[in-house]
Amino acid sequence: MNAAFNDEEFSEMPHWIVRGAFQILVFGLLFAEIALAVTVERGLIWLAVPLVLVASHLMHGLLIGLHEASHGLLRKNRRFNEFDGIVISTFSLMSFSLYRVVHQTHHAYLTTERDHEFWPLSQTTMPRWKRCLAAFFELNFGMFFTPFVFLRAFLCSPSPVRSTRVRRRIWAELALIVVIWTLVLWAVATFGLWKYFIWMYLVPAVLAGNLQSWRKYIEHVGLTGDTVNGSTRSIVTKSWMGRLVAFTLLHEPFHGVHHQRAGLPHSVLPQHVETLQP
């Protein structure tokens, strides 16, 4: 964060504060996928590559939508919020309820060993080479490593998921993931759609998973503070490009604000940027 900005500049900085940003991302991804289907069908690889990059960025934004849904802030209607969270998590190989519980440990026990979301980096007794190996896999295969971290938190003992009712729901959601993906892969194999599956889903999804891991490390890894501001990085920019990126990431770059006021929807985070001042 640029220290030259003052509190008044932060608070009055114009941002595209739109509650419907998530819906815009959904439609943006839909159009990108349609364009990808056309370019792949016609063999226009030179055009498909940049479209994959656009799709991966939008998918990254939807993954942040999962984060918003876990806080109950993605939709005003609770049922719609749960529905969107389950849909996004299912296609991200993740249980929505499991994500919600483990993410709570990240907020409640930030910078401590009880932060299961940052395992094994949060474990001071873990050998350094194991943490480095985990970081390598997370930064390069985030789509698969992230679900593994959360599943480990569910299966370990003691687990942060203690409620019997919640554990039953998590098992049901994991079963749903298996069923949905079995049907998807069956359809792809049966109708010979591998080319479209790889270009339209697999490649952009893998990139989006890595983008999420890179953002996660930017936000927290390598800091030694024991306060929210001391252990969280935020990115605040006045440029139109920076605002656009923040908008497409549901204002996640204002991460320190989110940690201090987790009950605020993403659309109002820029209005509280003064809380980032040391």
Image: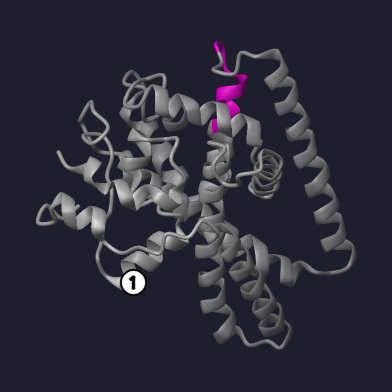
Number of numbered labels in the structure image: 1
Decide if residue 157 is on the left or right side of residue 217: right
Decide if residue 166 is on the left or right side of residue 137: right
Q: Quadrant of residue 172?
A: top right
Q: Amino acid at mark 1?
A: Met
| Residue occupying the point 31% across, 41% down | 256
Question: What residue sits right under mark 1 in the picture?
Answer: 241
Q: Quadrant of residue 176?
A: top right
Q: Is residue 69 magenta?
A: no
**Where 122 falls versus 223 (above or below)?**
above
Q: Residues within 10 Å of mark 1 (few under 14, many from 20)?
A: few
**Which segment did they paint magenta?**
150-158
- Name the residue furthest left: 4
| Residue occupying the point 20% across, 30% down | 225
Look at the numbered disc 1 and give the secondary structure of its residue. Answer: helix
Q: Position of residue 202 (x, y in %)?
A: 64, 60
Q: Position of residue 140 (x, y in %)?
A: 46, 51
Q: Position of residue 196 (x, y in %)?
A: 73, 71
